[in-house]
Amino acid sequence: MHKFAINLFFFTFTFIMSNAQDRIEGLSYIDNKPISVLIKNGKIIEVKKIPKLSKEHSDVYIAPGLIDNQVNGFEGIAFVGELTEAGVHKITRALWERGVTTYFPTLITSSHEVLLKNFSILASAKNDKQNLGTIAGFHLEGPYISPENGFRGTHPGKYVRPPDWNEFMELYDASGKNIITVTVAPEVPGCLAFIKNCNKQGIIVAIGHHNASAEIIDEAVNNGAKICTHLGNGMANTINRHVNPLWPQLSSDKLMISMICDGFHLRPEEIRVFYRVKGPARTIITSDVTEYAGMKPGIYKSLVGDSVELTDDGEVRNLQQNVLYGSASSIDKGVGHIIEVTGCSLGDAIRMASTNPAKLYGLKDRGSIEVGKRADLVLFKLINNKMEIQKTIVAGKEVYSKQ
């Protein structure tokens, strides 16, 4: 047999064997004890404690892959920009390198035509086998949000509008019925009925970019709203100290919250207060990462022509409005940052970045290391409260290795 053919045979054989069954070892993210995870055909078939790890794995943690419910773009590609399936694959691979094994492409306020077109592209990309099921569904953030400056954030005002169920169903159909969550402002006319319709459809409703009263927030919750999108952001810089949308969202036991823990969107004391009020069971870490992630510092033009600065330390600002323009950090940074500022355990941080979103959005096949779940795993070192990704495994396949 020709040498090339022999090498190809052994490579193929090894690849098939590694896909069929593989054993991964590391420190459990829950209790720091050594564990072994056996994978077969993309699923976890055994999890057991072991006496010790090999020297090369002695400081490597193993956890369920991170789940990000708000990804606007990456490496120069925006989900509301000139989108292609190749661009979607590029974002997916970039996120794999950061330990993200599931994410929701997020389309922000745009024209109906752009939303229709890009949801259609995403629907095709979601079903592409090379994405390995990493895209679990889509997040529509806007256009049914507050038109008020400050609460609207950097969403383009000309496209902000009240909800129209027929219009939304066009988007839902274009997405292949894969819109898994929608962020709305409940005080906008028609939004309370819209929330109720989404709830009947099985779509998780978040409230965000709003200036709703406590009474309207309560009504939104009663109609099915489940979570607050990036609490503490999407708000005006100056608010009434007593009457504002922050307190009723924090005080509601029925609302979960998501937080952007990139070191810029929330002060450490804000994160600590939010965490202490909601706790690890009702908190989700999100990234709100934009197309500026992975790019060089500098000044860029946004899709609507505004000047956006990406600073050397990773902050993204809209220079016209002097407000943040999303994030340039993936969710792995948030895991380390929340540990640093709250003192929470690694187990609780991973819970907020993987287990909680899986539970909220009905992703029963992922979000924890259990027999029968998808083998979506991340191996990493935790150095000075920073995740240093070593390997990412999606559906049993190694998709990234630092080495």
Image (tube, grey):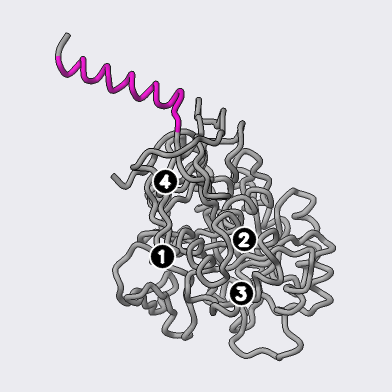
Q: Which residue is mark 1?
A: 384
Q: Given the image, on which type of amino acid does mark 4 rest?
A: Glu
What quarter of the picture does the N terminus occupy? top left
Please report whichever mark, 1 or 4, sits nearer to the chain's N-terminal start: 4
User: Residue 239 location, x and y as percent?
Assistant: 67, 89
x 58%, y 50%: residue = 30
Estimate how packed mark 4 is, as few (under 14), some (14 to 19) or many (20 or more) residues with alpha carbons within 10 Å: some
* Badge 4 vs badge 2, beta-carbon distance below 8 Å: no
The stretch in magenta equals 3-23
Cα distance between the residues tagged 3 and 1: 19 Å
Q: Is residue 365 magenta?
A: no
Q: Identify the residue shown where x is 74% and y is 73%.
A: 249
On the image, numbered disc 2 is attached to which residue?
Answer: 284
Label 2: state its secondary structure. Answer: strand
Tag nearer the camera, 1 or 2: 1
- The first of marks 1 and 2 along the sequence is 2
In the image, what residue type sits under mark 1? Asn
Say if 366 sits above or below 355 in the image: above
Instruction: Pick the quarter of the image with the C terminus.
Output: top left
Residue 272 shows which numbered tag? 3
Residue 305, quarter of the rendered image: bottom left
**Looking at the picture, does residue 192 appear above or below residue 68?**
below
Between marks 3 and 1 in the image, the one whose residue lies nearer the viewer:
1
- Residue corresponding to mark 4: 85
Q: Residues within 10 Å of mark 1 (few under 14, many from 20)?
A: few
